[in-house]
Amino acid sequence: MKRPFFLALIIMLLGLLAVSQTESKPQPQQPSSSGPAHSEPAQKQEPGKEHRITPEETKELFQSVDEILHFASERTLLPVKHPVKKSMVSRADVEKYLEEKFRDDVDRMRFERSELVLKKFGLLPRTFDLHSFLIKLLGEQVAGYYDETTKTINLLDWVELDMQRPVMAHELTHALQDQSFDLHRMMKKYEDVEKRGPEEPNALIKIDEESTCRTAVTEGQAMIVLLDYILAPAGRTVETSPQFVDLMQAQMEKHGDSPMLDSAPLLLREELVFPYGQGMKFIEQLLKHGGKKLAYSGVFENMPRTTREIMQPEEYLAGHRIAPLLLPDMGFLKKDFDPFDAGAMGQLDVSLLMRQYADEKTASRISPEWRGGAYYAAGRKSARPSDPTSTAHIGMIYVSKWSTDKAAQDFAHVYATALPQRYSKVERVKTGEGNGLAEQYTSADGPIFIERHGEVVVIVESFDEATAGKLITAVLKQVQEKPQAGN
């Protein structure tokens, strides 16, 4: 499923730097070539008055860019091919940049196109205003960013001075990634598919999980370098003190430091943290089992393809790959429906569904059994409801594959049990033959069909029975004729 648009954000939770530095017990030191030079704590400011980086402080920070860039290069083994441009920007500059980026970014366009589908899945509240929320959240969460187009690291003039250099360590890692692997070109591949939209559903399905993995790798590497930078004064690294990865991940998952993030639906909270927290843990495991070459350049040359590999690094290390679960030609829908959205439903998505519908325990039990998933949504022609939050005109098919028949049955049961959380007027009108093989429900959005065939579950919502039958038959034929590769 499409991830929310968040630029290259870095979550700098209050106290994170202080906690990490305190627990690593760094000793005061003078700047030297053996480690990064940390600045002195910023001077106390008047209560309620926001600090602004002075021209003198800006000059000092800019002078440390090359030093921190080479620190990141030493940690990642990614070469410094040329200097990085730098800029100190104000809130007004960032707001203008975000507005322009937000307006033109294809990820944002896709995510907003998927908004009604997310609401249909029950992952967003029906009345939730995604656009306004993302604008506000972006403004709160940005602590610095590397612009892949202008090749510039942008520092923010309101971020405390003692937090600027760790931010630089993170963002300069992106600059090194860009110099070796051309991040803009990598993103262009996904943008071209996004622009074509749901007319080519399988193209969207193929890139969904890949795109998420790319973000988790790039942000995970940058978080490891940030943590190495924090630990360097104590002579430690993530490799020698891996417990600090768990500490930082736990800090990210705490609530209370970000009012906007704390108020976000589960989907947005988890999708924002995932590339940084889980991505960082993934890279730490690659460091442990394969060293720096595998964790940095090696993973770029052999990218994980599914969120399962990020969530379970042992699957990536073992070479276990799961191919995308592609959908059949559904041209017969074109008479009455227009393509609306399509995408993969990966292990991360399943985990979120199970957490939303049930609880953490259920998610931990069911989601690792995922072996593929995809959805397709179509809008009924000439059906534009007066209520903009209505999803009744959106028909959807969701197919998933599982490790065993039992896992498929468990997933189908949880999904069916959660229908009243998503729709009003839910009633079961047909029960499967004792094992949930085929169930039918009615709801305010129309009929819902849930069928399980061995390890495959097919769910069709808001299509009439005849159309649903055609969709289920086509999907099962596709899955049976073209079995997935993987474990």
Image (spheres, rainbow, N blue to C red):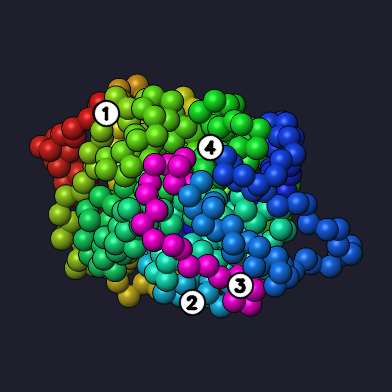
Q: CA distance from mark 1 to mark 2?
A: 40 Å
Q: Nearer the viewer, residue 169 or 421?
A: 169
Q: CA distance from mark 1 to mark 4?
A: 25 Å
Residues at marks 3 and 2 touching, judged by CB atoms closer than 8 Å: no
Amino acid at circle 2:
Glu
Of the residues under marks 2 and 4, which one precedes in the sequence?
A: 2
- The x, y position of residue 281, in whole percent, is 49, 34
Q: Which residue is mark 2?
A: 100
Q: Nearer the viewer, residue 158 or 98?
A: 158
Q: Which residue is mark 4?
A: 355
- Name the front one of labels 2 and 4: 2
Q: CA distance from mark 4 to mark 3?
A: 39 Å
- Name the front one of labels 3 and 2: 3
Amino acid at circle 3:
Val
Q: Residue at x 27, y 40 (%)?
A: 302
Q: Residue at x 72, y 58 (%)?
A: 160
Label 3 SS: strand
Q: Which residue is mark 1?
A: 320
Q: Which residue is mark 3?
A: 89
Of the residues under marks 1 and 2, which one precedes in the sequence?
A: 2
Q: CA distance from mark 3 to mark 2?
A: 15 Å
Q: Is residue 452 above or below residue 192?
A: above
Kindly indicate the quadrant of the structure image that contains residue 54. Answer: bottom right
